[in-house]
Image (cartoon, rainbow, N blue to C red):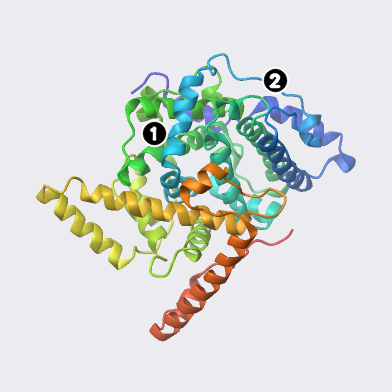
């Protein structure tokens, strides 16, 4: 195993947060009236991060006017090793070339990987309930982060003032406020077991989710990246990680040599929890509502497919999260395709089917984010160039028309469910539309 990643290093990462920014945020909280309410500050940061990102997308290079960001002094600029524009461009091209598949990978593999880490699930569920009253609002913000960092076909996205840079700095601030919120609102937090919330081990795992885990998902969907593309993609996420305060990316980028030892160590984190199961159920509900008639179970089916032979113990993830069984037709289709491939002479029929299904799921997932979260203070938007390429219309009229179609589909499914006797039981199993959150 790589000597850079001994077990002791992971124990240290788990018990370390981001001291530099935590001290700055603590001092900022102390200057607020009544000592600063962490919950109010988390809500404020979420709102101001949305404003700052809108400004960055509209006028790259403009300094954010957000009050919270203006009150906190950051070193500006990329790391000394982070100026390779050719690598950045190649890393970002992985998204522009396979964006729909990465959308499917985000929802059907990357997020479930976060949900089987108990402390991550606890923070994601608890803070989403408290701060935004919506589990899926946080998911939309994650999708927007992916677009801002990777989807603009411009390496300046990660330069000071760009959308990717603003997102990274904003997340670093937000994580510090989240730690303060957990200290304030979660007195039973087990720091000995979990370490501080959003600790360095989890931040490293997040970078791996958006890079290494994504490659694995793409390969399951018939998209195999070259070694050069994977190295560039990991380099780009390492630059983002450096800006976001990930210690493992402080002095150098992560490389392909780091993949196996880090993945092996992170594999010990997977565990079932009520929070993880609730997050997964709500995520599936959100995705499946936007699937066309006959395709509602495609997302859960893809989850099973993407984890079927996953390494480092990740094949247990669907079981740990109580993901419902895949659609019968999905199981039958892939059983037939595997048999055809083994017989030879198909030219990769299974890969072609997986690519098409992955792209279909990804497109409807993006549509779901646009339709559900295109309004409000932090709207989800994708660049028009990508919207045209993916056939996703973002106008108000298009959103309204899809809302009508969705209502029709919902009525058809309800009717079919009642006729087959599944409607009532499905309603009992489904989480509440608001994600089960309560206002404190």
Disc nearer the start of the sequence (1/2): 2
Q: Position of residue 24 (x, y in %)?
A: 75, 28
| Left or right side of 389 for 394 | right
Q: Left or right: 13 with respect to 137? A: left
Distance in Å between CA atoms under marks 1 and 2:
31 Å
Vertical comparison of 413 with 341: above or below: below
Q: Secondary structure at mark 2?
A: loop
Evaluate whether residue 245 shows in this view: no
Q: Quadrant of residue 304?
A: bottom left
Residue 263, numbered circle: 1
Foreground residue among 129 and 8 = 129
280 sits to left or right of 264: right
> What residue is rendered at 68% in x and 48% in y?
378
* Along the line of sight, the residue nearer the viewer: 367 or 242: 367
Are dots 1 and 2 in contact, CB under 8 Å? no
List the residue tagged with mark 2. Answer: 75
Q: Residues within 10 Å of mark 1 (few under 14, many from 20)?
A: some
Rendering coords of residue 231 (x, y %): 40, 25
Q: Where is the N terminus found, in terms of image quarters?
A: top left
User: Where does residue 321 sit, x and y in percent of width and height?
Assistant: 44, 56
Q: Nearer the viewer, residue 149 or 273?
A: 149
């Amino acid at each position: 195993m790589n000597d850079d990643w001994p077990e002791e290093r992971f124990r240290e990462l788990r018990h370390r947060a981001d001291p530099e920014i935590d001290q700055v945020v603590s001092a900022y909280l102390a200057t607020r009236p009544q000592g600063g309410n962490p919950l109010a500050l988390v809500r404020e940061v979420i709102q101001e991060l949305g404003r700052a990102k809108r400004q960055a997308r509209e006028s790259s290079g403009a300094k954010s006017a957000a009050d919270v960001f203006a009150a906190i002094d950051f070193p500006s600029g990329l790391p000394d090793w982070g100026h390779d524009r050719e690598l950045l461009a190649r890393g970002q091209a992985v998204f522009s070339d396979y964006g729909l598949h990465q959308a499917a990978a985000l929802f059907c593999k990357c997020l479930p990987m976060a949900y089987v880490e108990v402390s991550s699930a606890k923070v994601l569920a608890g803070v989403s309930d408290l701060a935004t009253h919506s589990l899926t609002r946080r998911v939309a913000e994650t999708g927007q982060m992916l677009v801002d960092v990777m989807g603009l076909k411009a390496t300046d996205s990660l330069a000071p003032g760009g959308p990717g840079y603003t997102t990274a700095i904003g997340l670093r601030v937000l994580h510090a406020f989240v730690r303060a919120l957990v200290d304030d609102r979660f007195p039973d937090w087990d720091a000995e077991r979990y370490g501080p919330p959003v600790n360095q081990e989890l931040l490293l795992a997040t970078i791996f989710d958006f890079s290494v885990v994504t490659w694995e998902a793409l390969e399951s969907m018939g998209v195999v990246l070259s070694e050069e593309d994977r190295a560039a993609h990991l380099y780009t996420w390492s630059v983002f990680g450096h800006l976001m305060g990930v210690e493992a990316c402080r002095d150098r980028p992560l490389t392909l040599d780091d993949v196996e030892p880090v993945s092996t160590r992170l594999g010990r984190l997977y565990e079932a929890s009520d929070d993880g199961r609730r997050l997964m159920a709500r995520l599936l509900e959100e995705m499946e509502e936007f699937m066309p008639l006959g395709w509602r179970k495609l997302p859960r089916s893809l989850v099973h497919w993407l984890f079927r032979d996953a390494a480092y113990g990740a094949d247990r993830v669907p079981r740990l999260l109580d993901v419902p069984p895949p659609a019968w037709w999905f199981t039958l289709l892939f059983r037939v395709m595997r048999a055809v491939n083994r017989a030879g002479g198909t030219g990769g029929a299974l890969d072609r089917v997986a690519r098409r299904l992955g792209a279909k799921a990804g497109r409807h997932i993006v549509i779901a984010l646009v339709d559900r979260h295109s309004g409000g203070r932090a709207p989800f938007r994708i660049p028009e160039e990508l919207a045209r390429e993916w056939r996703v219309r973002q106008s108000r009229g298009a959103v309204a028309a899809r809302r009508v179609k969705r209502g029709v589909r919902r009525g058809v499914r309800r009717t079919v469910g009642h006729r087959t006797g599944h409607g009532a039981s499905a309603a009992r199993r489904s989480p509440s539309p608001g994600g089960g959150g309560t206002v404190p």
